[in-house]
Image (tube, grey):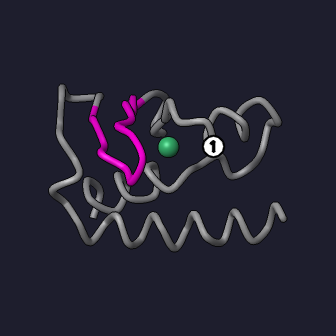
Amino acid sequence: MYYSTMYDERIQGFHYASEPDRLQQVSEDRVRFTGRHSIHTLTHTDEHWQCDCASYQRRDAAHCEPLFCAHVIAVERLLHN
Ligand SMILES: [Zn+2]
């Protein structure tokens, strides 16, 4: 179900945010994030973080608002607190 997936991803994002070792800053507007299954690259564009993971790309293609994934939630919490 879409809504439970969205909810789970928020939970996962908050969980990731408690594990800062997963985050590696590559440059001012680019970070690498080690998720449970693979490593993702996030890019900061137009005041927002974009992620290369399947979940984020699927939402982007469907024009979902808000546009996010577990990695974006974690990076925002870790870098903008
Ligand atoms: Zn992601």
Residue 21 rendering spot, x and y as whole percentages: 15, 56
Count every numbered label the image shows and give the total: 1
Q: Which residue is mark 1?
A: 55
Q: Is residue 26 above or below residue 11?
A: above
The magenta span reads 31-44
Q: Is residue 18 above or below residue 31?
A: below
Residue 59 rendering spot, x and y as whole percentages: 72, 41
Q: Is residue 42 left or right of residue 32?
A: right
Mark 1 secondary-structure assignment:
helix
Residue that appears at 34% across and 62% down: 77
Q: Is residue 50 left or right of residue 19?
A: right
Q: Is residue 23 above or below residue 47?
A: below
Which quadrant is the C terminus positioned in? Answer: bottom left
Q: Is residue 56 left or right of residue 40?
A: right
Ligand 1 has an atom within 8 Å of the beta carbon of the residue at disc 1: yes
Q: Main secondary structure of the magenta part?
A: strand
Residue that appears at 50% across and 30% down: 52
Which residue reaches farthest front?
Answer: 37
Rendered image quadrant of residue 4? bottom right
Q: Any magenta on residue 36?
A: yes
Other residues around mark 1 within 10 Å, as few (<14) / some (14–19) / many (≥20): some
Amino acid under disc 1: Ser
